[in-house]
Amino acid sequence: MLNSKSIRRDFPILSLRREDGKPLIYLDNAATTLKPRQVISAIIRYYERYTANVHRGLYRLAQEATSLYENAREAVAKFIKADSSEVVFTKNATEGVNIVAYGLNWEPGDEVVTTVMEHHSNLVPWQIIRDKFRVKLKFLDITDDGDLNVEDLTSLVSKHTKLLALNHVSNVLGTVNPVEKLIKLAHEHEVPVLIDAAQSVPHIPIDVRRLRCDFLVFSGHKMLGPTGIGVLYVNRDASDTLQPAFGGGEMISKVDLEKAEWNDMPWRFEPGTPNVAGAAGLAAAVEYLEKIGMDNVRRHEIQLTDLALKRLSDLESVVVYGPKRAENRCGLVAFNVKGVNSHDVALLLDELENIAVRSGLHCAEPLHRRLKAQSSVRASFYIYNILEEVEILCNTVEKIAGLL
Ligand code: PMP
């Protein structure tokens, strides 16, 4: 089991107190997570000890910086059970989706199937592609409980379908989608699959070999790592279907004035100087999570989510969105206090108890429309959160519901 009390000591922000002495209750982990000392030190260490560009210089420091960067790739690859040649470092999950969107060879009439529960990151790129290449978008709908209508996939897929692109875990409903089943179904129709794993890789054990997805994206900053580093996993068998969307130094093997030849995987998708410090920080984050064990992370979050779901669902004036059982979700709960604007609830949680939650549309506007909700409040948990904090959240929501 995971020891949150000792984990908390690794996170400098958690030792800060507000003027009134109240500690920070950080429940906005789906937006970004706090960073442990180990990650911060790894970033500082690169700048203090290893600063040099990578894959370029022959001098010792440059070789050391290159090893640091490539070792980080190996660590991340191991974390998701990929080969390191399949791990492309990006800026974030969003960039990963865009690299795929701009890298596939579109023809008018091609179709992309996605879902109504996507983050804008996995929707807007497809809308751009639709308008640029006359591609059609199709959407899998959800049930009122926030589960995907998986059976509808067969009727949405046609011989024109070029890609199925969907999230593993919804950043609003918390739903853990049955991606293994969906990937299998899509592959039966020879449709490749992109998984937006921004909300799953940080929270549940991921094995890309078992999933058999073609592409998968996630962000370092949602899993204890720094901002500005993310991952695009490209299955080796799918790599030839993808052309580099961006050109520049290091992504080529040979260039003349007329043309260029691409470097091997994964470098062909990493033009320009990469975020070396970010990669070092992400590797430290992965090491930190591996020490705890992703099964323990998952179990801990189910405990916190279970309490939040039970307590909030018991309040008559509160509507909770998404699957009823914590086991079917990741560690986040979106809700509304009936008749109260979500921003007012969030401001009061901050004001009364120094609780940080997100309010608004969480970059999932179509999903809110589908739920007939103007917006929502979202509490999201991670390894350093404790049951006492969830109790304080629920007590304060109850108090706010009584006040307004
Ligand atoms: N997909 C999902 C499901 C997310 O929750 C997020 C972040 N909120 C993203 C994609 C985008 O992540 P980033 O902004 O780090 O690219």
Image: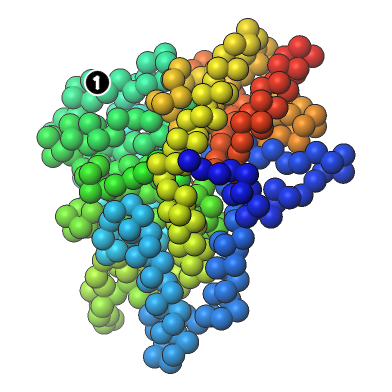
Q: Depth check: 263 or 87 in front?
A: 87
In the picture shown, does residue 200 fall above or below 368?
A: below
Residue 330 can be seen in this image = yes
The residue carrying mark 1 has its beta carbon less than 8 Å from ligand 1: no
Visual colour scheme: rainbow
Q: Callout 1 environment at 10 Å: few (<14), some (14 to 19), or many (20+)?
A: few
Q: Is residue 4 left or right of residue 264?
A: right
Q: Depth check: 255 or 233 in front?
A: 233
Label 1's element?
helix
In the picture shown, does residue 323 fall above or below 137?
A: above
Image coordinates of residue 261 in percent, x first then y, are: 23, 74
Q: Depth check: 389 or 145 in front?
A: 389
Label 1, on which residue? 152
- Going by the numbered disc 1, the residue's amino acid type is Asp
Q: Is residue 25 left or right of residue 261?
A: right
In percent of the image, x 15 and y 38: which residue is there? Answer: 187
In percent of the image, x 33 and y 59: which residue is there? Answer: 77
Q: Is residue 59 left or right of residue 50?
A: left
Residue furthest out toward the bottom: 59
Quadrant in which the C terminus appears: top right
In percent of the image, x 23 and y 44: which residue is there? Answer: 210
Residue 120 can be seen in this image = no
Quarter of the rendering containing residue 295: top left
In percent of the image, x 52 and y 56: which residue is there? Answer: 225
